[in-house]
Amino acid sequence: AQSVTQPDIHITVSEGASLELRCNYSYGATPYLFWYVQSPGQGLQLLLKYFSGDTLVQGIKGFEAEFKRSQSSFNLRKPSVHWSDAAEYFCAVRMDSSYKLIFGSGTRLLVRP
Amino acid sequence: GAGVSQSPSNKVTEKGKDVELRCDPISGHTALYWYRQSLGQGLEFLIYFQGNSAPDKSGLPSDRFSAERTGGSVSTLTIQRTQQEDSAVYLCASSLTRAGNTIYFGEGSWLTVV
């Protein structure tokens, strides 16, 4: 069955440091890949998405993600974290033949001043 | 509207009571989803509507849960005889078509069953 794994439940980084959040999926074909962010008490906001083409995608708020087919990964990165980036981040996958969005369990990002 | 609108934003109800949660999708979006997010958990798919097609109810956890979508727009998620384990955030989302690329989420309805 299709699944999404975010191995890090919590990550703490210092403000200004770089960030990488991991996401792995299990599926035979190339899925549609998404990263969403959820701030406390808020809904989900789309950061970026990958469908095809260039494997490095740029998103909002200075985030980027790289699709690596050989590793079945879609890791999210940011070169310099801001305190306002503290939130929960969800990786999600949707198959070409399906309408369901399957989510990972999320990674909570804490930012040290 | 500009985004997916959900109401109420917060609901506290007594165990055993029925609740209704409303979702108003983005205008023109034919696909509508309900997800549930329990404390410390990921997002669990509940139900999917696409146009006038029969909905995919495969994610509904029990027969106490039901949903309808009237006129292809507004949707209502109903939970009958609420239990404490129903306490969660219920998120509604919509997209343009079944093969639509981006799914947009509302801010959720926070349900607490006491």
Image (cartoon, coloured by chain):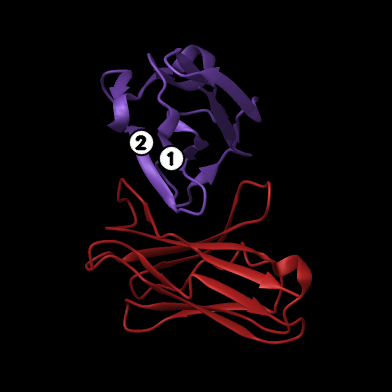
Q: Position of residue B51 (x, y in %)?
A: 33, 71
Q: Which chain is purple?
A: A
| The chain in red | B
At x 55%, y 42%, the residue is: A103
Taking the spot 44% from the left edge, 13% from the top edge, the residue there is: A18
* Residue B33, picture quadrant: bottom left
Task: Please tell me which residue is depicted at 76% across the width and 66% down the height of the picture.
Answer: B85
Say which element carries label 2.
strand
Q: Position of residue A95 (x, y in %)?
A: 45, 41
**Closer to us: A62 or A72:** A62
Q: Which residue is mark 1?
A: A36
> Residue B37: x percent and y percent?
60, 55
Question: Counting other residues with Cα less than 10 Å from the Cα at mark 1, is it few (<14), some (14-19), or many (20 or more)?
Answer: some
The mark found on residue A47 in the picture is 2
In the rendered image, the quadrant that contains the C terminus of chain B is bottom right
Secondary element type, mark 1: strand
B44 displayed left or right of B100: right
> What amino acid is labelled 2 in the image?
Leu
